[in-house]
Amino acid sequence: MWLITSFVAAILVTALWAYAPKKYKLSFLALMLWGLAVMILVDHVMGYEGSGSFLEMETEGLIENGTVLGIAMLIPVFIIWEIALVISKTKGEITTR
């Protein structure tokens, strides 16, 4: 399920990228989300043993729910994107003064 969560987030941000102003750096966010989605897809393909379902709803790790795991994987991506926005805004204010 975390595969679906990451692909949905990447698709939504890519769609928003076409309409939002460039100051929000949605291209950077979309690139990170597509990287996450591809990374998870490769992990699923490499770890798939042929038996059972390809899209799992539960995990055997610390976070047992697949949707919660997908959201937990999105949080650092959004934090890095926010830091990039703050840095670019700070640099923009310094150069305009």
Image (cartoon, rainbow, N blue to C red):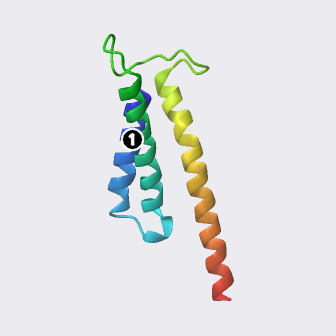
Q: Is residue 39 left or right of residue 90?
A: left
Q: Is residue 2 left or right of residue 54?
A: right
Q: Label 1, on which residue?
A: 38
Q: Is residue 16 left or right of residue 36?
A: left
Residue 83: image x %, image y %? 63, 58
- Residue farthest bottom in this picture: 97
Query: Which residue type carries mark 1?
Result: Val
Q: Residue at x 37, y 32 (%)?
A: 4
Q: Is residue 60 above or below residue 1?
A: above
Q: Nearer the viewer, residue 15 or 41?
A: 41
Q: Residue at x 43, y 34 (%)?
A: 40
In what quadrant of the picture does the N terminus appear? top left
* Element class at badge 1: helix
Q: Is residue 82 above or below residue 76?
A: below
Residue 39: image x %, image y %? 43, 39
Splitting the image into 4 quarters, where does residue 19 fall?
Answer: bottom left
In what quadrant of the picture does the C terminus appear? bottom right
The 10 Å Cα crowd at callout 1, few under 14, some 14 to 19, many 20 or more, is some
Residue 96: image x %, image y %? 63, 87
